[in-house]
Structure formats: C-alpha cells, structure tokens
Image (cartoon, helix red, strand yellow):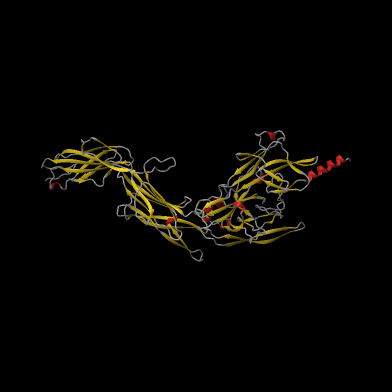
Amino acid sequence: MGDLDTQLIEDFSLASVTTVLLDTWDTGYDWTEGVRTDEKVQYDRPNQGDHKGDEYTYDTVREIISDGEITSGAGKFAKLSDGTIYISVGDEITSNPITIDETADTLAVNSSGVDWYNITQGIGARPIRLVTFMNVYAGEDQTVENGALYDHRKDVELTMMDELQDNLILGIDDFDSEVMWATAEVMGFPSEKEDYLNNETNFFEAYTNETDFSASQEAWLNTEVWLAEPVTDDTNTTGKTIYYGENDTAYVEGLAVKLAGYTLEPDEDTPLTTTQSQWTGSIPLATDDLKYDQTYIVAYYWLLADGRYRTDYKIVTVEPEEKEYDVTIQVFNENDDLLEDETYTTNEEAMMLGADLIDNTVSVTSHTVEIDFVEDVEESTETYVAWNHYDPAYRVTRTELIMTNNADFVVGYVETLGDLAEGDQITIPITTYYTQTGEATYEYVYTEVLNDGDSVSSQDQDITYTYQDTMAYTTTDQYTYTVEKDANGNLYLAFDKGVQVVITEDGEEETVLTIQDISYNITFNIYVEEIATVDVTKVVSNYNANMKDQSFIINLDGDYDTQVDLNHNETSKPVITVMQDGETRILTVSETVPMEFTLTGITYTVESYDLVDGVNVYNKSEPAALDAGEELIVNAGDMVHITFTNTYASQGYFKDRAEKANVFTNQ
C-alpha cells in the first residue's frame, strides 16, 4: 500500500469520526401538574411516557432539539452548498438554521430548518444533513409601567418543522431561490386546548399545533414566571440557571409566581386567578411595592411527548409609574357624527371651564382645560374642576367622571345622566391593583428510576417547590363627590379623597394601604346637545277676574308636535324643546278659538347668542306678527317667545268643548 493510499484511508477515517454530538437526554426536567422539578432528573429509565423521557430519549440528525457540540477531531465543517438552501418559515424565507463554531466546538439551533455540511480532512470527506426540529422565541425583554396591561403571550413565537422536500439536488436546486428545501410552521402562544382547565389558563400543558412530523403530536407548552434575584458576589449559583437581562445583568430564580397548575381552582365564573389575569393582560400588572422596580423571569418550556423540550425566556421589569398626573375637563357634542377614531367632537361654546389646585380660587377661564400636577408623596395634592353654563343654546345630556393610571388603564368610571346642580352627588367605584409577596411551599413525590445497566430499581424523590403566595390583589372603594357652587355661580368638584384599606389575609398581620383619588389622572367630560326653545304666553285683552279658571289649548305642529294648556297671562313652563340635533326646524302654531272669543293676533320674538371672537354676543329681534297656521322657522340656539292674544266678545253661554275644544262656563 502506497503513501497515497495510507493518506486516503487516514483522511477518510478522520472525516468519518468527525460528527455532531447530539443530546442523549440522560437528564432533564419532569413536570407534575405543571410543576417543574427543582433540579434535572434521570431520563435513563424504562417506559416513563406522558412527556417524561426514558432510555430511548435522544436527538437524531433528523430531529435536533437541543444545542449540541461537535467532535474535536481533525475534520472540518463546511457548507456543502455553494448556493443557498432556502427554508420557508411561516411567511418568511430564511436560511442558516444552524451555526457551527469550530473554535468552540459547538452547534447552535437558530431556527427550524435543514442544512447540508461537508466534513473534510485532507482529501477525505463525507456529507451530513442536519435538521433542526423546533425553536422557542420568548420575545424581547420588556419594561412595563406599574399599572399597565401586559400579556406575556403576545410576542411568543414557536417554530416547528413541517415538511422536508425530497428529490432536490445540491449544486442545482440550491441556486434556485424559488425552491424551498423545507417548510416550518410558525405558531403564536397556544390558544386551543383539549380540556376546560387548559382552555382557560394557558399556563401549562397547552397543546400546540401538529405538523407532518410525528414528533409534533401532543407537544405542549409550559409557562413559568419567577421573581428574579440579581446575582451578587454572595449568590450561590451552584446548580442554578443564570438568566441575563439588560446590560447583561445576571439573575437567578427567586420565588415562583403562583401560576402553575396545582394552584388553580377555576370555575365557570372565575376561570383565572387574579395573578393569572395580571399576566394575560386582563388587569394591570402591579408590583409588591409600587415605588420600586420588580423584575421577573418569564420562561417557556415546549415539550414533546417523549420528554424532550426546547426553552427560552425573557426578563420583564415592572417599574414604578411617574407620580405626575393630569386633571382634565372638556365638553363634547353629543349628537355630532363621531370622528374617525370614534371620539366625539369637542365643543368650545357651551361652557366656561376651569381646573387648578384647590388652594387657589375657583375660576372658569377657558372653553377647554387640562392641567398637570405632581403628587406629593407625603401629602396629596388637592385639585378641582369647574364649569359654568355659557351659551343657553346648549343643554347638558350627561357627564362622565373617569380615573385612569398613567398606563391609560381605567380604574374608575361613572356616568350621570342629565345636568348637575349644586348638592348633587357623584359616586365612583375606584379599583386599585397591588400585590403582596408571601411565601409558600408545595411538595410532591415523583419516582426516579435507576438503571445501572445490570439492574433497574426505583426510589421516591420528594420535591419541594417554593412559590410566591397569592400575588395579586384588587380592592374597590367608593368615592363620593358633591357638586359645589361658589359665589360666582361656578359649579365645581373637589378631588381630595383618601381611603385607607385594611387587608387581612388568612389571619396574618394587617396591612394598611392608603389610596388617594389624586393618584390617578382625572377626566371630567360634559356632553351637550344644541337646542332651540319655545315658550308660549296666553293673553286675553279684556280679561276680568271671572275668567281666572278658563284655560286654552294651543297647538304647535310640525317637526315637534305638542300642546300647551294655559290660562290668561300664563307662560308655558318649562320651555318647550323643539330641537335636539342642531338642524333647522319648522313649526306651525294655531289655536281653536271658541265662538265667544276672537283671535286678535300672534306675535313672536327671538333671542339668540352668537360667538364672536370668543365672546357671546346677545341678540333679540323686534316683535313680529305671525298668522295662524303660518310656518315658523326655528334655528339651533333660538329662544322663541310666542304670544297669543284673544278678545272676549260675548257674555253668552259657553258650550262644552268636544275633543280639543276649550272648556268654558256660563258667567
């Protein structure tokens, strides 16, 4: 055998023993009722099943789950394709699902996909196809303001191999950008589950979609949330996972937030605990102490039925909100068409408004007001909103009092129909969200199977799982405000309430939580509609005291039909509203005059206000005559006064009126 043959044999031998070292899953985590073992347990055990590994649990080059290593032999890894092997991953076209670092002898899974490598040594070579099966992307690290809504599920992305394309040729098909060598399915956080409990919670054993790969069947996702403890020089990190956040800050798991399956007692009315509602964006996410940051580790474990899993995490920091709030009072047009963003158009004519600190004199100076103020942590800041009717062409239909936190979450809302007057009271329920950190333990037993190759034995292992006890709380308190009036006739509401809430949990020490109404943004909305009013006055020109009990019915017909029943020198009260949507209206006025009376005449005057350069200018027309049955045009904002004058012409018998006829008596 010559030197060339020897070299050939040696090179091919070295190339053949250079390979990837895939995870044999000797150990891994077990889950019982959604609870993960504190430490990894032995997978080399017979027939475990139910998402727990056994002696046949291992990765293959066709299903690479874990990051791995490569042998440190003399062979070199190189891309076999001179073109690009394209993979369809959801809606995107990608390549390079694997990164091999020969310097560190590592293999890292980037995404689901397939790639071909050529392992070479001298003149020896061999190809290898590597298929990465699944990947978990937890999402970006997040900083959430205290009191904001946060749903941990929204940016989770799960990718799993769906189909490998056969009959493709390297050197030909890898140069065609239209050819996909594999397809992978991209899923969000699971939304469909197989039973009631999981359908409502989404925190553990949440089944994911199946693909054409059999390994995808009955895969599910578990979610864990931990209080993060920063790693310091005194932290014992032995056997612990190190998590990295912003600026490479290192954390280890502290207490687990009470989310896992054993904590759940859902029913049809309350499918989620309060804490679970916090992490799914149903109620605000709040910290234990609202003044300081609190950091969490949110980790996802995507398990296959054989116990293999892929995991990823994100760091979520809840920071205290800025203690700066707004007080706003504004007026909206009730009946205008809504704007594109479904909001009402503002009205700058109907009211004069004001808002300020309560230690200043109440005043109304503008048509729309918003002020900023900073809460004094030791002593709350007292504020007010004030308003005064400015244009009688408008009437108030309703008011809203809204309180929000700085994350724009509504913590209190109340609507009051109609106008408000001095002495009226508004009661608003305000819900406060907060947390208390307790500590509890949960213990369970799992059976560890020991297989030393010659014999199989088992032993029970006690696992203690320490978690943060019932984390999230809410309290709803009633705040009552009284409408007050100052010497200038301005109506106002003062915000200066403070409520102390006493919380006792399971006989533990009482906690006193002081909640201020001015710890929120306060918005007071007034809704108005433009109207016109009509009043009618009845006059008998030759009236005498014998007619004091006689009444007359006057008809107003047209867009608004109504009747008024009046005695001599009486004006209809309250005024008649004949317009509610800002459009021009036409009325006809008439009276059925009894034979003993004659209609002498109908006159009317119109009062109105015109807004000129921000100032209401008063107008009043001269009296004008109106024929019976003549149409009267009424515009928005008009205050119309109509006078009917009759003359009594006879001392004879007054007949009884039929239907709408007036009733008279003998004198």
Residue 660, can we see it? no
Q: In this view, does 364 lie to the left or right of 304?
A: left
Res. 257 image quadrant: bottom right
Q: Is residue 598 left or right of residue 161?
A: left
- Residue 365, given in percent of the width and then of the height, sits at 35, 49
Quick one: quadrant of the N terminus?
A: top right
Residue 80, can we see it? yes
- Residue 648, given in percent of the width and then of the height, sits at 13, 41
Comparing 199 with 116, the one in front is 116
Res. 529 image quadrant: top left
Q: Is residue 47 above or below residue 609?
A: below
Comparing 438 with 595, the one in front is 438
Q: In this view, does 563 lie above or below 437?
A: above
Q: Is residue 458 left or right of residue 514?
A: right
- Residue 193, given in percent of the width and then of the height, sits at 57, 48
- Residue 493, given in percent of the width and then of the height, sits at 36, 54
Residue drawn where x is 51% and y is 51% of the image: 149
Residue drawn where x is 47% and y is 55% of the image: 323
Residue drawn where x is 72% and y is 51% of the image: 24
